[in-house]
Image (cartoon, grey):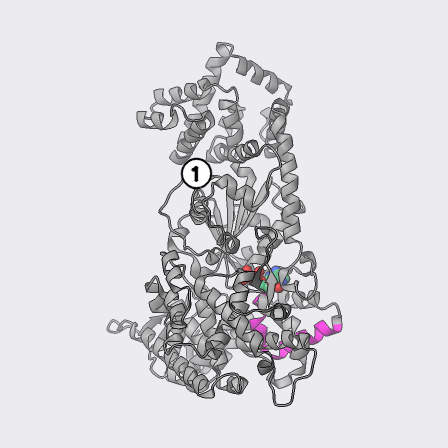
């Protein structure tokens, strides 16, 4: 065993074969082997006295001491790993000479193994390890059996959780396998060829690795780009035995659900209580996990939804130590806990704290559907091929809408609302707000048992439901709450018939098992309802709209979100202030503000008639327009004066793109013109701004009002062919692209 290790001796083998090495060092139950190896390393000068004392801590478990040694050697680098293996070999030779019983046992084992072990091919090397593991299983028969049972139970539970897509919960039970459509995954700064073929195995494989020592892979993407669904598919494929089979155990977590865990937990409790409870031998199974980190995969969906943003402060190294769940999570991600276990985390890009970046093994961007993905999804969604063809035709006729459909959540809405879409002819949706209003109307009409009275709008007819859900959504966004108990629903007057409309779905896997919890179909739907509430609510203070748009300032102020809640008289302000000493950045407020812009558009003024005071809505619309213009001016003022002889250049920040999108949602050229009137630059740099086709539509809409020609730089985004087409309206003002 050790001769072979030496031959392949590097850090990877130390990590991958950690369990076997630990067994070899500790399975006799006596510390003599470990001490022997440490003595060798000490004699060679590879370990100092301080290291020696850190490793051989009297009274600490033997396995923990051995683990400490492996961690130390691993951290020191490849050379130390090599020296470690030769120390082990030297020790083994000495023991052989003195005829120790353990070595006799090992010799017997080795003799029984096939002769191929001495050859070098990787497959045979794997076979060798397989045989060795098997031999260990025969030697220690009690726990692997329990382990196998546990693994089976976990697979069944993961499969049950991931088989159906929840957005279809209200309408039909849609098996994920039937509707899942490939999404685009992209490595930052990498060529297009690689990401097109990036499968689930590649996510944990070597491609795109930036930090060998880190265990965490981040999959980032905008809200609705398909992160949760992609992860759900990964879970399902693993449970079905089709992918990532090198991982014997997969523990899936949802950060949204972890928010509801208020007790301090140890890693063991976190795994077993939140994922799957072992019926027997909990300690042994957990020990197996500790000993075989390379066989285990953790996934954390929606890091952006965790109430606390990532910090690298409170370190925990002991898997038995209890701590608040977010502290455990941060330690798992950065590797102080469960080093060697691969972790896959999804998040929105805006919410990825800079401190997290250095702990990433790699980062992958999820970019939603490709043009052929849209086609494929629509065909899967509609069992009638004629219907699918008609939807696709109407998308081709409206490229702005086609651009929106790169986002899977919007593609889903458009497909759900195909009847409305096909019936609306010229007036088909252009903006995200249009699309969400379409699904709102669609859901209400689906449940309406009586015809609308003459002169009463659909919104008026359903005003009660909209207000209840709106307030629930709004309070949730202000409090970082995405899951609601029955008691929460009661507070905001949400009734059984409101629930039946289908905007809320029952949360899966929430403990305690018998009480019901709800969440919005999708977080963007929650933002949309919150935006409607901002417009309809008469108890909004004067500062609600400015607060919503002044996100820049709010980010600097850790209590910003709470202030937003406060200006709508949120009852929980004090509690929020106490809980969120480190407030997570809040892309949800940006999405809400984008919807507010769209809903306050001149085009929708009629919608609010008889639902709210027109004077008040008009006032809010003017406020929003002023905020957008002010936000733009602030951006422009920050442009440094050009060095003499050089062109004046502006490097836009992501907030600039967000402001542009808000202006586009309003669909009022007056505002776009006003915003662009004061911009005088020769060069507009929009690199790394997460620009896709949707952003291109908005950019063209606003930039075409520029007074002077500009050079537009869009490298390192995902513009694509559809995006380029969207940019055409502003081509006459671009002197280079
Ligand atoms: P995110 O987690 O990025 O916010 P979701 O995964 O929740 O996005 O996607 C939102 C909705 O879009 C899903 O509920 C589903 O209806 C649809 N969707 C997303 N990805 C896919 C996919 N790969 N195949 C089919 N539908 C998808």
Give the residue number, with chain letter if any, for mark 1. Answer: 321
Vertical comparison of 559 with 56: above or below: below
Disc 1 crowd, CA 10 A, few/some/many (<14, 14-19, 20+): few
Q: Decide if residue 456 is on the left or right side of residue 72.
A: right
Most foreground residue, 68 or 616: 616
Range of the magenta residues? Answer: 386-408
Q: Decide if residue 244 is on the left or right side of residue 590.
A: right
Q: Residue furthest top?
A: 98
Q: Position of residue 364 (x, y in %)?
A: 50, 55
Vertical comparison of 33 with 99: above or below: below
Most foreground residue, 18 or 516: 516
Most foreground residue, 645 or 403: 403
Q: Is mark 1 within 8 Å of ligand 1?
A: no
Residue drawn where x is 59% and y is 32% of the image: 281
Q: Position of residue 93 (x, y in %)?
A: 48, 15
Tag count: 1
Q: Residue furthest left?
A: 644
Q: Is residue 523 visible?
A: no
Residue drawn where x is 45% and y is 20% of the image: 31
Q: Is residue 69 visible?
A: yes
Secondary structure under tag 1 reads loop
Residue drawn where x is 47% and y is 40% of the image: 266
Q: Position of residue 350 (x, y in %)?
A: 43, 62
- Residue 23 lies in the magenta stretch: no
Q: Decide if residue 106 is on the left or right side of residue 449.
A: left
Quarter of the image where one finds residue 689? bottom left
Vertical comparison of 177 with 639: above or below: above
Q: Position of residue 22 (x, y in %)?
A: 50, 27
């Amino acid at each position: 065993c050790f001769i072979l290790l030496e031959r392949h001796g590097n850090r990877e083998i130390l990590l991958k074969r950690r369990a076997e090495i630990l067994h070899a060092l500790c399975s006799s139950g006596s510390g003599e082997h470990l001490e022997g190896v440490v003595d060798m390393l000490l004699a060679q000068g590879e370990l100092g006295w301080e290291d020696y004392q850190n490793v051989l801590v009297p009274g600490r478990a033997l396995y923990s001491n051995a683990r400490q040694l492996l961690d130390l050697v691993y951290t020191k680098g490849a050379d130390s790993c090599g020296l470690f293996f030769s120390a082990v070999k030297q020790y083994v030779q000495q023991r052989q000479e003195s005829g120790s019983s353990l070595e006799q046992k090992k010799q017997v084992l080795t003799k029984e193994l096939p002769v191929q072990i001495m050859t070098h091919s990787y497959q045979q090397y794997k076979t060798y390890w397989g045989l060795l593991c098997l031999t260990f299983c025969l030697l220690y028969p009690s726990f692997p059996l329990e382990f196998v049972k546990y693994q089976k139970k976990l697979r069944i539970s993961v499969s049950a959780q991931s088989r159906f897509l929840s957005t279809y919960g209200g309408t039909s039970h849609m098996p994920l396998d039937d509707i899942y459509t490939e999404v685009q995954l992209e490595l930052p700064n990498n060529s297009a060829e690689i990401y097109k073929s990036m499968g689930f195995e590649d996510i944990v494989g070597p491609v795109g690795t930036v930090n060998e020592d880190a265990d965490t892979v981040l999959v980032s993407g905008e809200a609705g780009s398909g992160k949760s669904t992609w992860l759900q598919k990964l879970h399902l494929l693993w449970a079905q035995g089709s992918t990532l089979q090198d991982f014997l155990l997969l523990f899936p977590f949802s950060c949204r659900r972890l928010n509801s865990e208020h007790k301090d937990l140890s890693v063991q409790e976190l795994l077993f209580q939140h994922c799957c409870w072992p019926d027997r031998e909990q300690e042994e199974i957990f020990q197996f996990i500790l000993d075989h980190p390379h066989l285990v995969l953790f996934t954390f969906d929606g890091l952006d939804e965790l109430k606390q943003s990532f910090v690298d402060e409170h370190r925990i190294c002991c898997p038995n130590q209890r701590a608040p769940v977010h502290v455990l999570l941060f330690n798992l991600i950065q590797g102080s806990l469960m080093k060697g276990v691969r972790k896959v985390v999804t998040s929105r890009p805006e919410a990825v704290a800079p401190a997290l970046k250095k702990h990433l093994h790699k980062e992958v961007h999820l970019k939603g559907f490709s043009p052929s993905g849209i086609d494929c999804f629509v065909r899967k969604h509609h069992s009638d091929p004629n219907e699918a063809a008609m939807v696709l035709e109407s998308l081709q006729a409206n490229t702005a809408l086609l651009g929106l459909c790169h986002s899977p959540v919007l593609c889903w809405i458009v497909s759900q609302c195909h009847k409305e879409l096909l019936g609306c002819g010229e007036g088909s949706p252009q903006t995200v707000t249009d699309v969400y209003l379409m699904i709102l109307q669609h859901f209400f009409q689906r449940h309406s048992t009586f015809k609308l009275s003459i002169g009463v709008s659909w919104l008026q007819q359903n005003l009660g439901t909209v207000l209840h859900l709106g307030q629930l959504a709004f309070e949730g966004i202000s409090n970082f709450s995405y899951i609601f108990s029955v008691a929460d629903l009661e507070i905001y007057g949400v009734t059984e018939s409101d629930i039946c409309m289908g905007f809320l779905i029952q949360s899966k896997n929430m403990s305690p098992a018998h009480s019901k919890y709800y969440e919005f179909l999708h977080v963007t739907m929650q933002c949309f309802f919150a935006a409607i509430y901002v417009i309809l609510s008469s108890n909004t203070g004067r500062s609600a709209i400015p607060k919503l748009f002044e996100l820049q300032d709010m980010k600097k102020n850790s209590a910003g979100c709470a202030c937003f809640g406060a200006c709508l008289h949120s009852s929980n302000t004090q509690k929020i202030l106490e809980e969120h000493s480190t407030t997570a950045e809040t892309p949800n407020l940006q999405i809400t503000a984008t919807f507010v812009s769209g809903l306050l558009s001149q085009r929708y003024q009629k919608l609010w008639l008889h639902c709210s005071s027109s004077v008040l809505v008009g006032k809010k619309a003017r406020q929003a327009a002023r905020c957008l213009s002010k936000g733009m001016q602030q951006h422009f003022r920050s442009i440094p004066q050009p060095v003499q002889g050089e062109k004046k250049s502006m490097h836009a920040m992501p907030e600039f793109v967000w402001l542009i999108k808000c202006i586009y949602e309003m669909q009022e050229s007056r505002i776009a013109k006003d915003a662009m009137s004061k911009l005088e630059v020769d060069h507009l740099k929009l690199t790394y701004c997460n620009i896709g086709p949707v952003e291109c539509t908005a950019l063209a809409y606003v930039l075409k009002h520029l007074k002077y020609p500009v050079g537009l730089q869009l490298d390192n985004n995902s513009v694509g062919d559809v995006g380029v087409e969207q940019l055409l309206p502003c081509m006459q003002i671009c002197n280079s692209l």
